[in-house]
Amino acid sequence: MKNIQRTILATLLLASSVAFAADGIAFITNLKGEVAIDGNQRPVLLSELAKGQKITVGKESLVSVMYIASGKEYVLRGPSDYVVRDNEVAGSTAMPPVTRDTAWRTTNKVLVQVAQTSAASVRMRSIAVAKPDRDPKLLFPTQGTVANLQPTFRWRPKANGEVMLLIAGQEKPVLLAKAVGGAYRVPARLLPETEYLWTVKYGGDEVGTGKFRTLSTAALAEVEKRRPGDKADFSDRLLFALMLHEMGAIQEARESWARLSEERSDLPELAAFAK
């Protein structure tokens, strides 16, 4: 229960902090330990920062701040105080910030979208404890876009089935195949920027119908270019999830948030992003 309450509080705080940072020029990409913004303890991941705000970092603590326009990231370690300037974070005491230039770019709009989506999801789940959903259903992909031309379809239960894939608006299937274990990887590359429908049948019954759209060739190339490795910095993996969300690959973004949440249980907002 305490973890649920922490997650609800974190996401509601994030939604409000991002929504009201109309003149935000930077945002938080990582934090550990004791961190305060203008004296307010425990800022939330992805919270926007405005010019002139004071960041206090405690002993053996850190916070990473990235500028929205330039993609430049500042890693601030404590004990020290820092101030958000127009184009840089300046240290006001002994510990100078560590900087790195990145190719990441985001927008205030997507920061607000992630915050509002996660906060709404948590509010809905806090109304009542939902019964476990065990009904047969399609799991992936069922909405938005996919950032892979050879996606792996997944459904529940993990049973053998028959997969059918069609281009939206066409009657002739582009794929009919037998699948085992509740998953099937498309064997040939799909067309970019195309809407597809897919269904699964097992035991003579249809599990359901899913709809998705593939990204454009340019967007797919950008995804592969920016895809971080398993040992990449935490903030790089966080920003990749943010990029997927901005591209409309919502389900893949949520899976990325979920993996980050397993790694960083000290950041309950990550679990909300994954919902």
Image: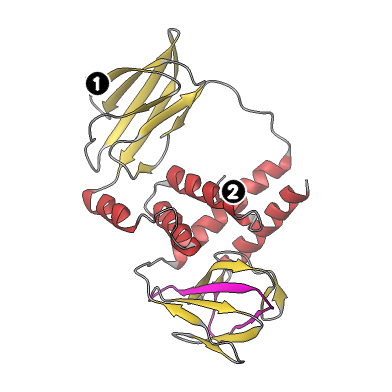
Circle 1: element type: loop
Residue 21 to residue 97: above or below: above
Q: Position of residue 242 (x, y in %)?
A: 45, 57
In the image, 48: left or right of 123?
left
Task: Say which mark, if any, is on residue 173.
Answer: 1
- Inspect the image, locate mark 2, and give the three-letter code of the amino acid beneath it: Glu
Q: Is residue 4 magenta?
A: no
Residue 214, by quadrant, is top left
Where residue 175 sits: x, y (%)?
25, 22
How packed is label 1: few (under 14 Cα within 10 Å), some, or many (20 or more)? few
- Residue situated furthest right in the rendering: 1
Closer to the camera in the image, 38 or 60 = 60
Pick whichever of labels 2 and 1 is earlier in the sequence.
Answer: 1
Residue beneath label 2, please? 262
Residue 64: say if magenta.
yes
Under mark 1, the amino acid is Pro
Magenta residues, as a range?
49-70
